[in-house]
Image (spheres, grey):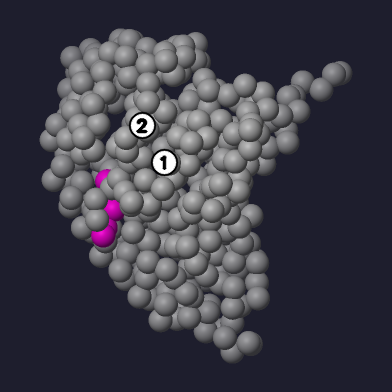
Amino acid sequence: MRNPLSKTITQIEPSGIRKFFDIVAEMKDAISLGVGEPDFDTPWHIREEGIYALEKGRTFYTSNAGLMELRVEICNYLDRKLGLKYSPKEEIMVTVGGSEAIDVALRAMLDPGDEVIIPQPSYVSYLPCTKLAGGTPVIVELKAEDKFKLTEEALKAAITPKTKVLILPFPNNPTGAIMNYKELEKIAKIVIDNDIYVISDEIYSELTYNGIHASIAQIDGMKERTIVINGFSKAYAMTGWRLGYAAGPHIIMEQMIKIHQYAIMCAPTNSQFAAVDALKNGDEDVARMVEAYNQRRRYLIHTFNRIGMECFEPEGAFYVFPSIRRFGMTSDEFATRLLMEEKVAIVPGTAFGNCGEGFLRVSYAYSLDNLKIALGRIEAFVNRLDIKL
């Protein structure tokens, strides 16, 4: 028989995040600090709106771009938070999570051979989605000494005549790094000078701790060349509702909706009704969750630095990215031994790109009690390693 599989997909590695958690699922008393999922329940008033939508029989298809009521509220949110004004009819598209928005944006914008600059460490989907869209990934390695921010020098060095898209993954998964407005201004000048488009993944925009989130789309000349991607999973603890959105120029959104139309039809209807309520009435819930995350963040930073796992201060998302370089082990080896010896699951930094070697991603989207137990086990493991050093 002929090979039924695409060469492109068979050459793409599966996500490195899931490897350890298949083991954890069958390991008694194991603690996982690996999955990027809030430990909070979706706020009740949001759930109630989803239930009400079902009770009222609102189980129909929405328009391909999403409920107009939701698109209007997304526009209101982007204006209120960022001062960005979009047309709900032409410049907003509701997607099945932020991940679909990333995939569809790349497929709508790339021709074979177009280059996409991807700063790493970063979310695992950017590189495979680029390849599946026929693009060529160009990796820019973010460095701890730069606080894992994208620098002007690194961006300029990656640009070629084939460069079409820059992905901006800030606030960053896995490092927790952010880019402030002044830093984004420098990146924007390079983008404009080289006629590049930007996909700005801002799914963690609400989870910032030392200032206000900034979007590159706020900078003069950038809104018309930026796709802003966001969603409800992280800020509103709505991961299973599978709802995100993209905002951008009509010329791009029109083609993104066409792909979405043929592949998906529309995002889940009851999720969309619930999301309307989230945007209208969810600010206090977000603030409460951010306060809890910030407490956990400070605890992890302090503990990792105290036990000799150097950890820079993340200013966004809900991850820390401690270094294990002093132990002379690979990230995979450290994570595997920690899981087998102490029953704590974390993600090797290499799951987010080769330059993540020497680091681990640890999520603090877990209760403080569980974090304290897990950190106690990690400290015991580190103490045993120190005896051998």
For label 2, count other residues whose C-alpha is less than 10 Å away and answer few (under 14), some (14-19) or many (20+).
some
* Residue type at tag 2: Gly
Q: Secondary structure at mark 1?
A: helix
From the top left corner, tell me how far across and down residue 105 is, in percent.
48, 25
| Magenta span | 206-210
Tell me whether the residue at label 1 lies in contact with that at label 2, contact meaning CB atoms closer than 8 angstroms.
yes
Q: Considering only vertical position in the picture, is 334 above or below 247?
A: below
Q: Considering only vertical position in the picture, is 141 above or below 49?
A: below
Residue found 47% across the figure and 58% down from its top: 148
The residues tagged by marks 1 and 2 sit, at their Cα atoms, a distance apart of 8 Å
Question: Label 2, on which residue?
Answer: 221
Q: Secondary structure at mark 2?
A: loop
- Is residue 328 something one can see in this rendering? yes
> On the image, which quarter does residue 296 sit in?
bottom left
From the top left corner, tell me how far across and down residue 26 is, in percent.
54, 54
* Residue type at tag 1: Ala
Indicate which disc residue 210 carries. none
